[in-house]
Each structure stands twice: as C-alpha cells, then as structure tokens.
Image (cartoon, grey):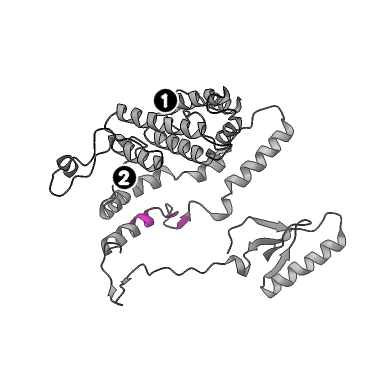
Amino acid sequence: MHMSNTNIIIPQRANDNASLALSSLIHALYELESYAVARLVTKESKPPMLVLLAPSVEADYECLIEVQLPFAEDVRSYRFPPLDKIITVSGKVVTEHRNLPSAALKNAMSDYVDSMNFVTTNDEGEPTNDLPIDESFSPLLHRIESAVRYRAVHPNDPILDPSERLTEFAHPSEEMVKNSKSHLEKLMSTADVKKVPPKTKGRKRQRETEKPLSGLDVDALLSLEPKRTKISTENAIPEFKQTLSRAENIDAIHDAVQQMAKIIETQITHSLGHSNYDRVIEGLGTMREELVDYEEPAIYNDFVRQLKGKMLREELGGDRRELWWFVRKGKLGLIGKSEVDSSTIEEEEAQEFLAAN
C-alpha cells in the first residue's frame, strides 16, 4: 500500500442532503464490514487518485477515512536473488558464502532488533506500547501547518521552534539506546564492520605509484620517459593528462600548464572565425578539471585571467569576444572556494569575473 497521508471525508456544513447521503454510505459500509475503492479528483486538471474509503462510526461523529492506493502501473515487480543461498552458473546451490549472513550474524541482528522493541511491560507485567500509533504524528505535515498558521497571525515574527511533542519522535529514548548499545556492539563485531576512511579529494600528485611484483622500477631502468615531456599540439589533451600523472613536484605541474597554455593561445590565434573554438574550450575545460583535482587553483586562475585580458584586448588574432561567450557558457572561469578549499577566490568574485566583458 502506498504510504500517503490519511484524510477524513465529512459532509459539507449546512448541507442536509450531503449529510444524509454520506451518512447512508458510511453506515452501509460499516454494517457490511466493507471498504470502498474510489477514484478521486481533488481539483480541475489534476490527475485522478485511487483511494480506499473505510467507515468510522462513533457515538457523536462519523466519517470516511481515505487512504491513497497505487494504480497497477505504479507497481513494479523486481526479481532479486535469494538472500539465503547463491546459485552458481553451473546450477550448484551454495549456502555458505562470504556474501551470505552466517547464523551468528542472524542471531546478532535479531537480538539487536528485539532490543529496540517499543512494546514493553509495566510494573504489573502487562504489555504497554511506548509509541502507540494513535498518538504519533507526521512531523513534516504538522510543522508546515503550524508554521502557516503562526505566520498568518504573526506576519513579522520569526517562526517558533517545533513542538517537543513532534521532535520526540525523531530521537529514540535514552533507555532504548542504552538497552540496545551492547547488542549493536556485538552486531558490529560479528559483522566485522570497519570504518571506511573518507576519500581524499585531489592531491593526485601525492599518490603512491603501484610497485611491480619484482620491486624494480622498470621505467627508470629502461629510461623510457625523459625528465621533461613535450606536449604536442596534435594530441594535447591526452599528453597533458599523462604529463600531470607523472609530475613529481609543483614545478612539473607548472611546466605542463605553461605548455598547454601556449597550445591554447596558439589555437585561438590561428583560428579562422570559430573553427578552433571547440578545441580551445575542450582544452581549457580539461586544464580546469585537472587542476581542481590536483588542488592547484591558483595556477589555473592566473592563466585564465591572462587569457581573458588577451582576448578582450584582441591580442590573439583579432576580436575574440565570441570565444569569451563560450567560456562563460561553459562556466570555465575562476576556481572558487566552493570547489577547492585552498582557493582564495570568493563566489562573488568568480561570478563577477565571468559576467564582466
């Protein structure tokens, strides 16, 4: 069943005919111990909903309880592999595998779930529910409605904090946390849960290169790579990435960027109209992306400032304002603090740099 909001349907006030008709339907369903399925359209041009109507009759109040149901096309049938066995390609059934929970893990999980049971016993030994369903509320729904009501009466005052009656459902009780702590620790130990270190952003040049099984540096022995690699114009982007991947210090990164910068400026200068603009934008985007990963925003920012000045001063083969429009469209401006923490460029400055012509 679709987990939607639950509403009640009551007749329009001062409408005796509507009250009589709805009351007849409510009592008919109640006496037959039946529910009704209906299509509901709440307003014009809104798609219909499939709802379930359940009667509710009390001494001084009667209504229909409405709950939304899914349509047949909303139901998705997915086939998943079994959780208690693995069937190999040859058809063999394996019941013990590293991807299958062991008996000890199942018991530990069962004990942990039982320790969080809301149903407890009182002093008289009778079961009591610490969270009865008829006393629980939807925090989101009630928070929005209370904020709207308060704003209507107090248009200039700040919205009050949510009621403690709502926030208490967002946090388990201290007693429950205390009771389940030991079971959680046992579960983590049985499942061999380990903390995964956060993924380091950038710093590619500081990574350790994989060592061959022999322990010998084959490249160094054969001298396959010279100390300084020249980036060619014909294959600039792949060679630029390869040069950065082999960079051992910041000077090597500076050298690769300078070579790539000269190639980009040459492409702009010799571009007939916008014939080379796609290559320029691709090269500039690659340089920006790589230097973001390497957390070297200053190198890119210095270059793109110089490039913008040369283009606007028509020092790269004439009027290149159209190319600057492509740079702005691709958002290839300054690298700000929102992208790299070590950057000194604020978000406002980065936006002004792209906006200015």
Residue neighbourhood size for the residue with mark 2, other residues' Cα within 10 Å, grouped as few (<14), some (14–19), many (≥20): few
Residue at 44% in and 45% down: 172
Could you tell me which quadrant the C terminus lies in? Answer: top right
Q: Nearer the viewer, residue 160 or 320?
A: 320
Position in image of residue 135 (x %, y %): 57, 51
- Counting every numbered tag in the picture gives 2
The disc labelled 1 sits on which kind of residue?
Ala
**For this view, does 219 lie left or right of residue 332?**
left
| Circle nearer the N terminus (1, 2) | 2
Residue furthest bottom as drawn: 91
**With respect to residue 312, does 161 lie above or below?**
below
Q: Residue at label 2?
A: 196
Nearer to us in this view, 56 or 268: 268
Indicate the amino acid at tag 2.
Val
63 and 5: which one is in front? 5
Q: Which residue is mark 1?
A: 298
Q: Residue 99: name its quadrant.
A: bottom left
- Using residue 25 as the reference point, say whether residue 122 is left or right of it: left
* Magenta run includes residue 112: yes
Q: Is residue 110 left or right of residue 340?
A: left
Q: Is residue 198 visible?
A: no
Q: Nearer the viewer, residue 202 or 33?
A: 202
Residue bounds of the magenta highlight: 111-128
Element under label 1?
helix
Estimate the x, y position of residue 110 in percent, counting from the top left.
34, 60
**Circles 1 and 2: CB distance less than 8 Å?**
no
Discs 1/2, front? 1
Compute the Cα span from label 1 to label 2. Answer: 31 Å
Q: Secondary structure at mark 2?
A: loop
Q: Quadrant of the N terminus?
A: bottom right
* Image coordinates for residue 22, horizontal then vertical, percent: 79, 65
